[in-house]
Image (tube, helix red, strand yellow):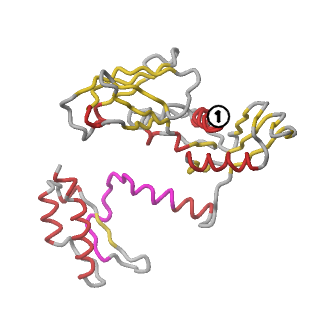
C-alpha cells in the first residue's frame, strides 16, 4: 500500500517547506504536490494549514476554508473543551467506600465504587487500586460489589450507530466507570486443530465458541480483518468468533467492545480481585 507508506514523507516535505517560506502564507511546495500525485491523492481532496500559534497569518495554506472529513482532527475540539472546562491540572478520581466494619481482613458489608469518568483506568491501575485496598486491611468482601455510575446521566446509546460495528473498541460508549477502555480481551491460541478462545478475565454467564478455521497458507498480516466476532443470539449470551486464522500468527489478542461499561468494569474488577 504505497499511499500509506508515503504519508510520513508528505509530513517531512511540508515541514521542510514551512521552514523555507517567509511569514506570508505560501502555496503547497512542488515536492509535496509530486508526493500527492505519487499517492494518487487529488489536490482538491487535501486541506492544509500550518500556522504558528502566536502568529496572525498562516505560514502555509491550501483550501483552508474547505469542509473536509475531520477524522482525528476532531480530537482538537474535545481537547480544547476539556482544557476550557476542567483546566490543565484536572485529574479524575474514583471513590471507594466500605459499607461495614473490617474485621480480621474481612469487610462485613458492601464495597461501593463510585466513578467520575476516569478514561484511563487500565488493568494496571485497577490492580494498583486493589492493592491499596488490600493494604488498608481488606482481604475478603463478605457483601456485594456496588457500582455507582450516576456521575454520568446518559441516555441509552447504540455503540453500532456510527458504522454498524458495535463490537469495535473505538465504538465504546462513555461511562462513569470505564475499565481498560471498555475492552474485553480474548486470547486466540492455535491448538493444531483449531483455535481456542480464552478471555482475559472470567465472563460470568457468557460462553465463548470458536468457529475459527486454522489456515496454514494465509499471511499473518491483516489477521484481524479475517476474524469475525459476533453475538448472533443475545438471548443465549454466547460469543462466537469465526473466520480464517493464520497458523503463522501464533497466539494473538483480540480487543472487543462487548458490554456496557458498567458490566465490563464489574467483570474486570471481580476478575482481578479473585487472582
- For the residue pair 195 and 183, the one nearer the viewer reads as 195
**Residue 138, relative to residue 201: is it above or below?**
below
Q: Residue at x 32, y 22 (%)?
A: 194
Q: Residue at x 15, y 56 (%)?
A: 39
Which quadrant, please, contains the C terminus? top right
Q: Does residue 190 lie above or below 41 as drawn?
A: above
The residue that mark 1 highlights is 274
Q: Nearer the viewer, residue 55 or 67?
A: 55
Question: At 36% from the left edge and 78% from the top edge, which residue is drawn?
Answer: 57
Q: Quadrant of residue 205?
A: top right
Q: Name the residue: 75% across, 30% down.
A: 144
Boundaries of the magenta span: 59-79
Give residue 176's position: percent from left, percent from top: 63, 43
* x and y percentages locating residue 11 in the rendered image: 26, 66
Q: Is residue 64 magenta?
A: yes
- Examine the rendered structure and indicate whether residue 19 appears above or below residue 232: below
Q: Position of residue 13 (x, y in %)?
A: 21, 70
Amino acid at each position: 500500500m504505497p499511499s500509506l507508506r508515503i504519508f510520513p514523507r508528505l509530513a517531512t516535505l511540508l515541514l521542510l517547506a514551512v521552514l523555507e517560506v517567509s511569514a506570508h502564507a505560501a502555496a503547497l511546495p512542488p515536492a509535496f504536490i509530486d508526493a500527492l500525485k505519487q499517492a494518487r491523492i487529488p489536490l482538491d481532496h487535501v486541506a492544509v494549514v500550518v500556522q504558528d500559534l502566536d502568529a496572525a497569518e498562516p505560514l502555509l495554506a491550501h483550501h483552508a476554508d474547505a469542509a473536509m472529513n475531520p477524522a482525528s482532527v476532531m480530537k482538537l475540539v474535545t481537547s480544547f473543551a476539556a482544557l476550557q472546562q476542567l483546566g490543565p491540572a484536572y485529574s479524575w478520581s474514583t471513590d471507594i467506600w466500605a459499607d461495614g466494619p473490617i474485621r480480621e481482613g474481612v469487610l462485613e458489608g458492601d464495597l461501593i465504587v463510585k466513578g467520575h469518568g476516569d478514561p484511563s483506568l487500565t488493568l494496571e491501575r485497577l490492580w494498583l487500586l486493589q492493592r491499596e485496598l488490600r493494604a488498608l486491611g481488606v482481604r475478603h468482601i463478605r457483601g456485594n460489589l456496588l457500582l455507582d455510575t450516576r456521575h454520568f446521566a446518559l441516555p441509552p446509546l447504540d455503540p453500532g450507530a456510527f458504522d454498524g460495528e458495535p463490537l469495535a473498541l473505538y465504538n465504546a460508549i462513555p461511562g462513569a466507570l470505564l475499565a481498560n477502555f471498555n475492552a474485553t480481551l480474548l486470547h486466540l491460541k492455535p491448538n493444531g486443530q483449531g483455535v481456542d478462545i480464552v478471555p482475559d478475565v472470567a465472563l460470568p454467564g457468557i460462553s465463548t465458541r470458536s468457529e475459527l478455521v486454522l489456515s496454514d497458507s494465509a499471511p499473518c498480516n491483516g489477521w484481524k480483518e479475517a476474524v469475525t466476532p459476533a453475538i448472533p443470539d443475545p438471548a443465549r449470551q454466547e460469543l462466537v468468533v469465526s473466520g480464517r486464522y493464520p497458523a503463522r500468527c501464533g497466539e494473538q489478542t483480540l480487543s472487543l467492545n462487548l458490554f456496557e461499561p458498567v458490566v465490563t468494569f464489574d467483570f474486570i474488577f471481580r476478575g482481578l480481585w479473585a487472582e
